[in-house]
Image: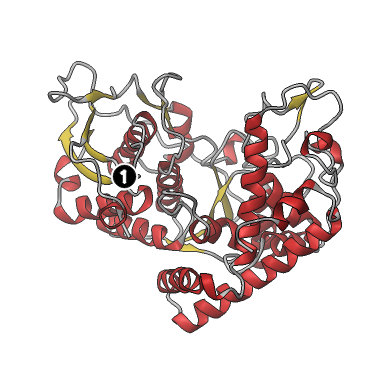
């Protein structure tokens, strides 16, 4: 499925030129100037290109940044979903990028991920990116596996599980402002610790929040890390609800969210194969498990991770701080899945981790910490959306009404993973059954007077 099949794209494409300072943009193009709007991080490049300088991979980083600029700076249409982009990017190796195979695999990956129509063309750079000299790293064990690492629940849990199974060789690639054991690992042994580019957009320029391009950004970063390590395997940390839930229970007119689905990463594999003749393999060891099952498995290890300083909340920390302390809201979809999964895993968390300390309260307003003054209708909307999302996933289990959706996603996932359709449908059916059991058990633990339980009882999915 792409934008062509989902919603007809806007007929006039948004023209964007990611070109060098002093170059003239095409007529009517938005200008994303390299070195100003799009900048490469010196520290990030040192962290990545520690042993080899690859101009094709530098170009791929710039393309990912240009895609992010397009995605965030152009609002989706009021009716429908798809936009149309005509993107021009200055690269070191214009001939390689302009080859039909490389261009087509790039455009196909972007269209499948974002639900938009993409035409990408290239021009030769006038001034090459200044080469960062490789530096020697003191490594204790040979690299075996790359893992995208955000230092959240899934990252910590799956890293612990994989380390226990593989007995070393796991390389964490940071995807956020935390992680990669930065305080523990000496600089001379640290790699992939900084996202190597930045896109500067003012508040008025950043107009689109769906941000599907984040999936391309993080897939490219981990794929580049695999090229440079070098290793062949990339482990994706998402459990079943995270990888499949956004596709099974997509809302309204939105295009399904494939950011961590294997159907998208298979397209990234094909892009790397076309560009470099060497493709990594993205693995999904927890895709048929619930988040609660993954946490329980990690928590049962001889040396389990710590959980108290992880964060799942979608809300800006400024909105959910209280008495000078950064908290999580506790009611958005990410927080609700976290709390249900921690309940399933038997991991206790103090209520003070959340603004909504008490989910057993009869009214939502009564569940917030006493003295919280920033209650708004937006929080109520987030809570309703979070409850209904988990309830919708639970309602997919065993319901004849939803079998077509379940079978479609099972078929698509099985095909991407290279397993038989029957096996994929059996695995997805089992995942949904266990999610439903976890959700109902969580609701029982809150009591039938809880505002969470009362919203679920009148959910349209029942």
Q: x, y (%) of residue 276?
A: 28, 54
Question: Does 167 appear above or below 54?
Answer: below
Read off the residue under disc 1: 82
Where is residue 48, by image quadrant?
Answer: top left
Q: Residue furthest top?
A: 22
The quadrant of the rendering that contains the N terminus is bottom left
| Callout 1: SS | loop
Q: Residue at x 71, y 42 (%)?
A: 331
**Residue 234: image location, x then y, percent:** 49, 58
Res 169 visible: no
Asked if residue 319 lies left or right of residue 64, the reply is right
Residue at 16% over, 33% down: 124
Which image quarter is the C terminus in?
Answer: bottom right
Dividing the picture into quadrants, the one containing residue 293 is bottom right
Q: Would residue 9 be visible to someone looking at this image? A: yes
Residue 6 lies, in percent from the top left, at: 32, 55
Q: Position of residue 177 (x, y in %)?
A: 59, 33
């Amino acid at each position: 499925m792409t934008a062509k099949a989902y919603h007809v794209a806007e007929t006039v494409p948004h023209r964007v030129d990611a070109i060098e300072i002093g170059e003239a943009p095409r007529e009517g193009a938005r200008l994303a100037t390299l070195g100003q709007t799009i900048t490469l991080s010196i520290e990030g490049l040192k962290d990545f290109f520690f042993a080899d300088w690859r101009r094709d991979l530098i170009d791929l980083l710039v393309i990912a940044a240009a895609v992010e600029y397009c995605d965030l700076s152009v609002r989706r249409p009021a009716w429908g979903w798809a936009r149309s982009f005509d993107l021009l990017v200055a690269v070191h190796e214009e001939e390689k990028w302009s080859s039909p195979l490389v261009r087509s695999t790039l455009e196909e990956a972007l269209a499948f991920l974002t639900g938009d129509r993409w035409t990408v063309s290239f021009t030769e750079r006038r001034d090459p990116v200044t080469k960062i000299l490789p530096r020697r790293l003191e490594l204790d064990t040979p690299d075996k596996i790359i893992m995208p690492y955000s230092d959240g629940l899934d990252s910590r849990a799956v890293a612990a599980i994989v380390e226990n199974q593989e007995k070393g060789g796991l390389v964490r690639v940071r995807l956020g402002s935390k992680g990669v054991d930065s305080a523990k690992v000496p600089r001379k042994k640290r790699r992939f610790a900084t996202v190597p580019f930045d896109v500067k957009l003012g508040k008025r320029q950043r107009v689109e929040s769906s941000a599907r391009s984040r999936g391309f950004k993080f897939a490219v970063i981990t794929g580049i890390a695999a090229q440079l390590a070098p290793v062949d395997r990339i482990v994706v940390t998402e459990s079943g609800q995270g990888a499949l839930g956004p596709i099974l229970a997509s809302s309204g007119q939105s295009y399904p969210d494939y950011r961590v689905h294997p159907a998208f990463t298979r397209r990234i594999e094909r892009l790397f194969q076309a560009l470099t003749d060497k493709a990594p393999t993205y693995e999904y060891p927890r895709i048929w498990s619930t988040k609660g099952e993954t946490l329980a498995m990690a928590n049962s290890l001889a040396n389990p991770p710590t959980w108290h300083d992880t964060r799942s909340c979608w809300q800006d920390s400024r909105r959910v701080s209280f008495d000078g302390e950064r908290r999580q809201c506790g009611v958005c979809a990410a927080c609700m899945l976290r709390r249900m999964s921690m309940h399933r895993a038997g991991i206790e968390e103090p209520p003070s981790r959340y603004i909504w300390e008490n989910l057993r309260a009869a009214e939502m307003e009564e569940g917030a910490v006493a003295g919280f003054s920033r209650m708004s209708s937006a929080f109520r909307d987030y809570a309703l959306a979070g409850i209904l999302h988990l309830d919708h996933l639970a309602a997919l289990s065993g319901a004849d009404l939803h079998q077509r959706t379940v079978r479609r996603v099972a078929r698509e996932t099985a095909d991407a993973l290279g397993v038989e359709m029957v096996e994929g449908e059996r695995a997805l059916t089992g995942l949904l059954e266990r999610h439903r059991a976890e959700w109902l058990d969580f609701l029982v633990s809150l009591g039938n007077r809880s505002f969470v339980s009362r919203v679920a009882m009148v959910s349209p999915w029942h």
